[in-house]
Image (cartoon, rainbow, N blue to C red):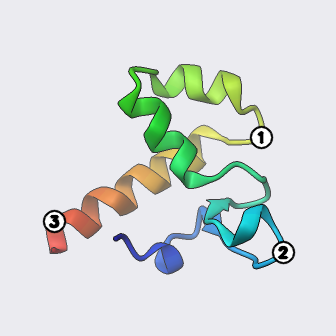
Amino acid sequence: MLDWSHCPAVERAADRVSGAWVFRGTRVPVKALFENLEGGATVGEFLEWFPGVSAAHVDAVLEHAQQSLEEA
């Protein structure tokens, strides 16, 4: 499991979205990005479907995930 606590594009609060990691300033779970990508969506489509999420958010999350996997 990835440690999202060091990714500046995400945040977590116990009283929001059941404590799930979400894109900072939104209620969109980070998990939604990966589920949509696994389902065949493009990043562009994801950004259309979740307008509160920015391309910078997505880039930071994907970069954090890649770095975490390389370190593992």
Query: Of the residues shown, which amino acid type is indicated by label 2?
Result: Asp
Query: Of the residues shown, which amino acid type is indicated by label 3?
Result: Glu
For the point 56% across and 53% down, the residue is 30
Query: Of the residues shown, which amino acid type is indicated by label 1?
Result: Gly
Which numbered circle lies on residue 70? 3
For the point 21% across and 64% down, the residue is 69
Q: Residue 32's spot in the image, x, y percent?
A: 56, 43
Q: How many residues crowd mark 2 within 10 Å: few (<14), some (14–19), many (20+)?
A: few
For the residues labelled 1 and 2, the Cα–Cα distance comes to 19 Å
| Residue to which mark 1 is pinned | 52
For the point 27% across and 57% down, the residue is 66
Whether pointer 1 and pointer 3 mark residues with C-beta atoms closer than 8 Å, the reply is no
Which numbered circle lies on residue 15? 2
Residue situated in front as seen by the camera: 17 or 63: 17
For the residues labelled 2 and 3, the Cα–Cα distance comes to 32 Å
For the residues labelled 1 and 3, the Cα–Cα distance comes to 29 Å
Q: Quadrant of the C terminus?
A: bottom left
Which secondary structure lies at badge 2?
loop
Is residue 55 placed above or below 59 in the rendered structure? above
Residue 48 picture quarter: top right
Whether pointer 1 and pointer 2 mark residues with C-beta atoms closer than 8 Å, the reply is no
Q: Quadrant of the N terminus?
A: bottom left
30 left or right, relative to 16: left
For the point 69% across and 42% down, the residue is 53
Ranked by sequence position, the earlier of labels 2 and 3 is 2
Is residue 16 placed above or below 33 in the rendered structure? below
